[in-house]
DNA sequence: CCTCTTTGTATCAAAATTGTTTCAAAAACT
DNA sequence: AGTTTTTGAAACAATTTTGATACAAAGAGG
C-alpha cells in the first residue's frame, strides 16, 4: 500500500483529504506542522507528500529544502492564488500544486499522475478478495487464479485503480479502447457491456461492479 | 463551499447580498473599499468577486486591473446605467455586470452562469442530510445510498443548487427538459409533477420541497 | 357550496439503455 | 497450416426510465 504524508494545518481540510485518500486505497499519515513532518521523515518512508505552504513552525518552502534530497515527490497545496506562488512552488522542486479550495477528484488525478511519473505505482492491486499482479499479469480471486484476457485485464486494472469512482462510458472507452474514440459509433457498440459481463462472471462481481444508468460503471465496496 | 468576495460600500446593499448568498450556500466575505479588498486577495482565494464600481480609496476599475492576473471571475455591480459603463465594465475583463437596483434572483442566476463557465461548480452538494456527489452520481440520505434515475438526479441537483429559491415551472422545464420548451404543450404535461413526486418519495422531501401554487417549487430549509 | 384551475397520484405503454447469446473475424500460438 | 484464444458485431432479451393518460385532491375565487 502506497504511503502518503499529508502536512496541512487546517484540520477540516486535512481530515477531508485523509478520508478520501484512505478510501482510494492509500495509507495516510496526517501532520499539522512542518516540524513534526520533518521528524516523521527522519524515520519513515513515504511515496508522496502533500504539503501546505502556510504551516506553523517550519513553512512549506523550508520543509521542501529538507525533503528534496530524499527524492520523494511533493504536491504543494496553497491557499494563495497568485502566480508568483505557483512558480515558486514548482521551481522549489514540487511535482505539482493545487490551489485551495480544490476538488477531491482533481487531487486524486494529480496524485495518480505524479506517482506514475515516479514509478511508484503499485504492482499489486487489490479489491476485496481479488488480487491483481500487474507486473506478472496474474489475477487471483481468493487463492484461486483466474485467467483473464488482455482486454479484461486492462479493464479490471482501470476499475481497481479507480475504485469508488464512477467511470463514465466515454472515459472507459478512452482508457481501454483509445483507438475507438475517434471512430464514430461508440453508442452503437456493445463491446464495453460485453467485457463488463465477462468480468462480472469470471470474478463474481455482480454486486460490486455497479451499473450507473445512463452514465457508466463503478467498482464500489 | 464556494467562496465569494463582495466589495460594495453601501452597507445595506452589501448586507442584503451577503444574506442571500449565504442562504444560497456560498461562503461570503464582505469588504467595503478597494484597498482592503486588495489586501484580502493577497492571502485568500475566492471563486468569484462581486465588485461595485464606485468605491472609496481604490475604485472598481482599478481593482479590476489587480484582479485580472488572478483569473478570478468578476461580476460588476454598478449604479450607473449608462452604456459607456457597460462597455467599460465588460472590456476591462469582467464576466458580467448588474445595474442597481437588481433582483436577488437575477444576481443568483448570473453567479450560477459565471461559476459554471469557470468550472467552479462544486461536485459535492448538500441539503440537510442529503448529499449529492455530482461527479460520481451518488446520492445519499444520511448514510444510505438512494438510487435516482438520470432525470431525477438532474432535477435534484437543480433544486440544491438553487435552494431557498422558488423555481418556476417554466424555469424547471428549461433546465431539465430543455428539449420540451420549444414543443407546444408544457401546460398539458404532468412530467414535472411526476418527477417531483418521485423525488419527494425517494428522499422524504414532503416538507422541504414545497409547492408554490401557481408558480413552481422551492426546496427550503 | 360550487366552479374552475392547478397539483398529486396510480397505471401503463413507449422509449432508452443495458444485458446476453451466438458466431465469425482477427490475433496468437503450435 | 492448423488450432486455440480473444475480440467485437449483430441480433435479441431484459431492464430501467420516462412521460402520457386518466382521474383524484387541493386551492382560489366567487
Image (cartoon, coloured by chain):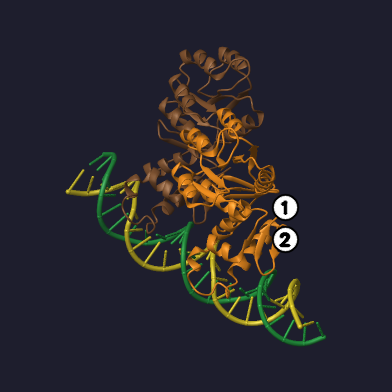
Chain colours: A brown, B orange, C green, D yellow
Residue situated in front as seen by the camera: B152 or A190: B152
- Asked whether residue A206 appears in the rendered view, the answer is no
Secondary structure found at label 1: loop
**Between residues A135 and A201, which one lies in front from this camera angle?**
A135
Q: Residue at x 67, y 70 (%)?
A: B214
Q: Where is residue B23 in the image (x, y as percent from the top left)?
A: 68, 48
Residue depicted at x 53% and y 21%: A46
Q: What element carries label 2?
A: loop
Quarter of the image for the N terminus of chain B: give it.
top right
The picture quadrant where one finds residue B218 is: bottom right
Q: Which chain carries label 1?
A: B
The chain that hosts pointer 2 is B
Mark yes or no: residue B196 visible: yes
Q: In this view, does B182 lie above or below A156?
A: below
Up-down: is B135 above or below A6?
A: below
Q: Which of these two is toward me, A145 or B182?
A: B182
**Looking at the picture, does residue A137 appear above or below residue A35?**
below
Closer to the chain start, of discs 1 and 2, is 2
Q: Mark 2 points at which residue?
A: B206
| Residue B148 position in % (x across, y down) | 59, 57
Q: Do the residues labelled 1 and 2 touch (CB within 8 Å)?
A: no
Q: Is residue A134 left or right of residue B13?
A: left
The picture places residue A132, in percent across and down from the top left corner, at 47, 35
* CA distance separating discs 1 and 2: 12 Å
Image quarter for residue C23? bottom left
Query: Residue B221's mark?
Result: 1
**Dot 1, crowdedness within 10 Å: few (<14), some or many (≥20)?**
few
The label shown at residue A61 is none
Task: Indicate left or right for A190 with B216 as reference.
Answer: left
Amino acid at each position: 500500500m502506497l504511503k502518503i504524508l499529508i502536512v496541512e494545518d487546517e484540520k477540516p481540510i486535512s481530515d477531508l483529504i485523509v478520508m478520501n485518500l484512505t478510501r482510494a486505497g492509500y495509507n495516510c499519515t496526517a501532520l499539522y506542522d512542518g516540524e513534526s513532518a520533518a521528524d516523521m521523515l527522519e524515520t519513515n518512508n513515504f511515496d508522496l507528500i502533500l504539503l501546505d505552504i502556510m504551516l506553523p513552525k517550519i513553512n512549506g518552502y523550508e520543509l521542501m529544502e529538507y525533503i528534496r534530497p530524499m527524492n520523494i515527490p511533493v504536491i504543494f497545496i496553497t491557499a494563495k492564488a497568485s502566480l508568483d506562488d505557483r512558480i515558486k512552488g514548482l521551481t522549489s522542486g514540487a511535482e505539482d500544486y493545487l490551489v485551495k479550495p480544490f476538488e477531491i477528484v482533481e487531487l486524486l488525478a494529480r496524485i495518480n499522475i505524479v506517482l506514475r511519473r515516479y514509478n511508484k505505482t503499485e504492482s499489486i492491486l487489490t479489491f476485496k478478495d481479488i488480487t491483481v499482479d500487474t507486473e506478472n499479469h496474474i489475477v487471483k480471486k481468493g487463492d484461486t487464479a483466474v485467467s483473464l484476457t488482455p482486454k479484461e485485464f486492462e479493464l479490471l486494472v482501470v476499475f481497481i485503480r479507480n475504485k469508488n469512482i464512477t467511470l463514465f462510458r466515454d472515459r472507459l472507452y478512452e482508457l481501454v479502447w483509445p483507438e475507438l474514440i475517434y471512430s464514430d459509433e461508440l453508442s452503437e457498440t456493445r463491446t464495453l457491456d460485453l467485457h463488463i459481463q465477462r468480468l462480472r462472471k469470471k470474478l463474481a462481481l455482480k454486486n460490486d461492479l455497479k451499473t450507473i444508468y445512463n452514465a457508466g460503471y463503478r467498482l464500489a465496496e
